Structure formats: C-alpha cells, structure tokens
Image (cartoon, rainbow, N blue to C red):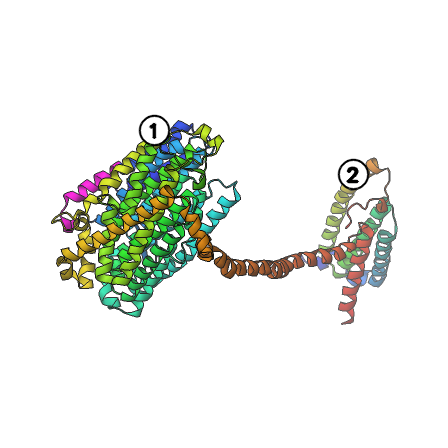
Amino acid sequence: MNPAETLPAAAALAVPLSAFQLVAAVLFTIGVVGVLVRRSALIIFMSIELMLNAVNLSFVAFARQHAQMDGHVFVFFVMAVAAAEVAVGLAILVAIFKSRTTASVDEVHLLKG
Amino acid sequence: MLTWLWLVPALPLLGAIVNGVGAGRIPRKAVSAIGVGSVGLAFLIALGCFRDLLALDPEARRFGQTLYTWMQSGDLNVPFRLALDPLSAVMMLVVTGVGFLIHVYSTGYMGHEKAYGRYFSYLNLFTFSMLTLVLGDNFLVLFLGWEGVGLCSYLLIGYWYQKPSAAEAGKKAFIVNRIGDWGFLLGIFLVFVTFGTLDFGGVFSQAPERLGHGSALATAIAVLLFVGAVGKSAQIPLYVWLPDAMEGPTPVSALIHAATMVTAGVYMVARCHILYLLSPTALLVVAVIGAATALFAATIGLLQMDIKRVLAYSTVSQLGYMFLGLGVGAFASGIFHLVTHAFFKALLFLGAGSVIHGLSGEQNMQKMGGLKAALPKTHLTMLVGTLTIAGIFPFAGFFSKDEILWYAWRNGGPVLWGAGVVGAFLTAFYMFRLYFMTFHGASRVSEEAKHHLHESPNSMVIPLILLAILSVIGGWIQVPLLQGGQRLDAFLEPVFADGAALAGHAAEQAAHAPGAEITLMVISLAVALAGIFVAHRFYVVDPGIPGRLADRARGLYRLVFNKYWVDELYDATIVQPIYRTSVRLWQRFDDAVIDGAVNGVGRMMERGAGLLRLAQTGYVQVYALVITLGLVVVLGWLALR
C-alpha cells in the first residue's frame, strides 16, 4: 500500500512548515536559555523537557510534510526516553534535596578541580 | 666412584645452602655437623675418585662428566662439565683435605661467635667455589669458580662487618680482584675469538698450530690470563688486598692462604701451561713477577708486628716462588710447592690463630713472648711449620722450594735464582723472628690476657697436629735425585707431557746434573740456617740489636716498616682520583642531568595540570554553557562555510 494514498499530501497542510519550525526553534531556545540561567534543578528539568518537545514538534512537522512514518516513530521513542529520564532525574533530585535541603545546582559543585 | 665426582663440589654447596637458609634457626651442633660433614664427605669421595684414577693407566687418567648444557648461543656452547685429571685431582685433594681440617678447627675457634651458621655457610660456599674452579673443564666453569672465591673472600674477610676496617678490607679484596678478573675475562674472550671454543681440551690441542711459537697473540692471551692470576694470587702489583684480608677470622685466612683462593692463579697458569710455553715473553713475565714478589714481600715481612700480617706477607712471597717455578717452566714444581705450602701455611695460620685465641684476641707480637710453656702443643706444631717454611731438611718446604730454585738456576739463570735465594734467607729470618718473638724470651703479655691464657681445645689442636705431620712428610712424595722418588712429577706427567715436548727440553729433563743440584741444595740450606741464626741473635741472644739497627738506618727502616708506602701510593694515584671523579660525576651528572631530566618532566606535568584543572569549576551550568557555545561555533562554521 502506498503511504501517499492514506496520508494527506504536503499541500494539504493548512499551516506552512516554516511556522512549525519557527515555533520549535523558539521553544528550543527558551529551553536552552532556561538550562543555562536557572538555578533550580526542577526548572532545569522542565527546560530540558521543553527542548525535547521542540524537537518532537519539528519531527512531527517534517513527517507530515514528507508523508513518512519514521518521524512519528521517533517522537514516541523520545517521549518514552524522556519519561524514563524524568523518573531517574527526579529520584536523584529527591536524594540530593534530602541530604542538602536545596535543589539549587550552584550548591552542588563538589566535583571541581 | 669416579661417577660420583659431581658430589665433591655439590656437597659443600648443599651445606652452604642449608646453613645459609637456616642460619639462626639450626642449633649450633647441627651447623657444625653440616658444615664439617659436607666437606669431610667431599674429601672421602675425592679420595675414592683419586684411588680410581690411580687404578687407570697413566695415559688414560682423564675423566670427564657433563652435568648439563650451561648455555648455548650461536657458536658458543658451554657445557657445565667437570673433569678429573692428575692436576685437578691434586688440587681437589688439597682443597677438600686442608679445607676439612680448617672446618674442624673453626668449630673450636669460632665457637663463641653469634653468626655461627652464616660463617659455616660462607666457608662451605668458598670450598664449593674453589672445587668448581679446579674441576671445571672449560674456561667459563673455571671463571665461575674464580668469581665465586672472589665473592666468598669478600664475604668472609668482611665477616665482622660491624668493624669498619673489616668491611673496608673486604671491599678492597673484592675490588683489587676485580681488576685482575678484568684481564682474565679479556683473556677468555681472546681465547674464544681465536679458538671458537672454551673447552680446555679443544683450546690446548689447537693452540700449537693456531698460535705458533712466540706469536704476539699467544703472548696477549697468556699475559691477559696472567693478569687474573696476579690479582687472585696476590702478586705485584695487585698483592695489596692479601695483607688486609687479615681482618677476617683466622681460619678464613688459613683457608684463603692455604687451600683456596690464592692458589687459583697458580693452578690456572699450570692448567694453561701450553699457552705459556708458546710465549717465552709471557713465561718470562711470570718468572720475573714471581721472583720480584718473592723478594719484595719477604722484605716487608721483616718488620711487621702483627703475627698474621707477617704470615700474610710470607704467603705473598711463597706464591711468588710458585710463579717463579711456573715461569721457568717447572710446572710440576710449582704445583708441588703449592701442595706443601698448603700444608705448612694452613698449619702456621691455625697455629697463629691458636696463639691469638689463647691470648684473648691479641695479635701484636710485641705483646707476646715466652708462650712456650703455656701453649706447648701450639708451640711444637708452630716450630714444625716454621722449620718447614724456612726450608730445613727434611721438612716439606725444603724439597719444594729447592726444586723451584734448581729449575730457576737451570732454566732461568743466576738472577732469578739469586732473588729466590735471598728471599729464602729473608723467609727463614722473619719466620724465626715471629717464632722467637712469640714463644721465646721474656713474656710481654698483658696482665689481663695472662689471666685467661690457655691452650686451645682439641678441635683446634688436632688439626694442628695433623697438618704438622703433613708438613713433615708431605715433601717425601717428591724426593730429588732419587730414582723413582719423584712420585708427584710422575703422577702429573700426563698433564704436562705435551708441554714438555713443546718446550723442547724434554731431553734436558732426563739429563739431571746431580752435582750442581746438590751444590744448590747445600747453598740454600746454608742460607736458611744463616737466616735462623741471625734471627736467634737478634731476638733471643740480644734483643737490642733490631732497635739499634733501625736507628742506624732510619730512612730505610721507615720505608720498609710502612710497606714501601704502596698503599698510600695507590690511594693517591688511583683510588683518590677515581673517588673524586665519581663524586663529581655524581653531583654534576647524576644529580644535575639525570635527576634534573626526570624531575623536570614530573614538574612540567604538575604545572600543566595545575593550569588545566582550573577549567573544572564544579558548576554544571558552566559546562553546559561551554558545550552550547561549542555547538554554536561548530554549527556557525558549518553554516557559513
């Protein structure tokens, strides 16, 4: 079965591709800046999620554009890994908070030269 | 029994290992039993081998035993091979026999020592090394023993290593020997380059045609090997270690001087006699150095006050006689003197040890005198030893020394003979000076030593008596002028036969001139008696004479008393320059260059790492920022390319 027959063609996209990419880029940049400037580990986590979802958005948009399933599959993978990462990351965060009563990454800088 | 030959060196080695490993854990009685027993058993086996060797035809008296292949590399193939022929049989019997008596004596003399096991371990190792040396069938096995005795002399001379002088003397013996070994090793290399083998049989059978009579190569090999003998057998100019070796325990001195070590050089030259006969120059060098040493060391012995040092210089002098004998081509006579010397020098040293033991460690003859009554057995045996070394008929020393002097006259000429005769006079004089100063005259013993004065225990006296008997009868194996009386000559004949043919005076050998020989004998006997007479006048009749004589010839007296300042000369010309150069090398090169390079690399790493580690701030966000910036740069570069 030809995928082109079941999926709408690129021309069917109501919103142009560049708009999706712009939103994704903005979201990603917000995530990067968040990771770099915020001190709370929780916020940093959220920023990372933002970056991941920016990429996801980009993936999905391209997949629609080219009428291929690969991009969709990738997004599912990213979501699964992100979920696992959050589970582990939060556990570490809880452990750090228990011992140091803070979630600020500036307070956790033992590994320095 | 011949197949048991390997046990002769193996047993002392086993004893050395057991006593060495178990030092301090094995009870003293067991140490004595192992130490003495291993050498005693070796002596018995040696006797058995000797008996079996005698049973063979004179021409067939050669037994070889390959234990294993020691090393194989290209053309070099060295089996660990022992060989028994008449020459090594004589040496083996002397080493084990005299060595055994010295071991027995040691149980009495060293009885109070703390490190008893260590002592016997070294002593056995010494015996093992010397047996390897005399039984080895190629130059490398001989060299193994050669180095072994050097090592053991170092260990034993420095036995009381807490005493700085003993430690120094041990080092001196080892280093001076190393100088000789250097020449010896070069000689071995030259032998291998020339002949392509190190086996005695191969080298000596090829030597006449490969080298040619009187060739420079033959001279080079013979002289280089002789350099080793000069070091090991304490000849001019490398004799300086032997008198200092007196720092070791007295039985060790006896072992070094009589049975092992110093006889190695004589044995080696006799073993390589073909090489020496091929080079008249080398033979002359041997003879001249021998005669010079015999005379030179005898003069030093005249004025020494330490009883053991007198004996040490007498050993140097007697070894000179042996080399004189070898140098004039009388190899069997050199070996004969080696054997009788082993008897009487062991006797003299052990006797001196007995005196020292009786006087609680006193070695200065100025603090002895009149000990005849207190030490009757020691006195009697010492008298026998002194008469023997002085060369009085019919003691062993008379026969062996006169044979050498006879050959020196016949083959070497009046100069070499004259040096030998003057040496004989001096020997008789200083040995009887020792005897009279120790046993006769008024007692000069300190009150405290007098209090403890005692005759030595049986374990020490019995070896003395046995050695005294050997000193008396030992010469009778080789009676001159008597048809069939020269049994040692006849026994050694197969070994030296090829050499005799080479030297070309085989015919001469038969034509003995009895008249001349008797004249020479009478002369040397008269000279020896004169020496004794003078010593008697000087030290018994009128003890003031030596002092007055010394006053009259102050300069000469001081020159001889200070041993011609040879030690000082060596110190100033060789030891100090090397020492100073070493210090400079150590400070300028070792400390500055080598240590500087090593430490410099380390310091460079440390500094570099110190700078780099500043990058590790510990702030995760800094790392993230750097990663991001790096990514931007890379992407920017890719985009703008």
Q: Residues within 10 Å of mark 1 (few under 14, many from 20)?
A: few
State which quarter of the image contains the C terminus of chain B: bottom right
Q: Which residue is mark 1?
A: B458
User: Front-most of A18 and A47?
Assistant: A47
**Residue at coordinates 74% horizontally, 61% vertically from top-left?**
A66
Q: Is residue B26 above or below residue B547?
A: above
Q: Comparing marks 1 and 2, which lies closer to the viewer?
A: 1
Residue A15 forms part of the magenta stretch: no
Residue B428 at x, y percent in the picture: 31, 48
Residue B277 at x, y percent in the picture: 24, 62
User: Front-most of B477 and B584?
Assistant: B477
Q: Which residue is mark 2?
A: A91
- Specify the label residue B1 is tagged with: none
Q: Is residue A48 above or below residue B638?
A: above
- Quick check: can you spot residue A76? yes
Helix, strand or loop at label 1? It is helix
- Quick check: can you spot residue B138? no
Residue B564 placement, left or right of B419: right
State which quarter of the image contains the N terminus of chain B: top left
Q: Which residues are magenta?
A: B44-60
Residue B52 at x, y percent in the picture: 18, 41
Magenta region's main secondary structure?
Answer: helix
Residue B209 placement, left or right of B550: left
- As measured in the structure, the alpha-carbon distance from the residue carrying label 1 to the one carrying label 2 is 91 Å
* Amino acid residing under circle 1: Asn
Residue B44 at x, y percent in the picture: 25, 36
Residue B53 forms part of the magenta stretch: yes
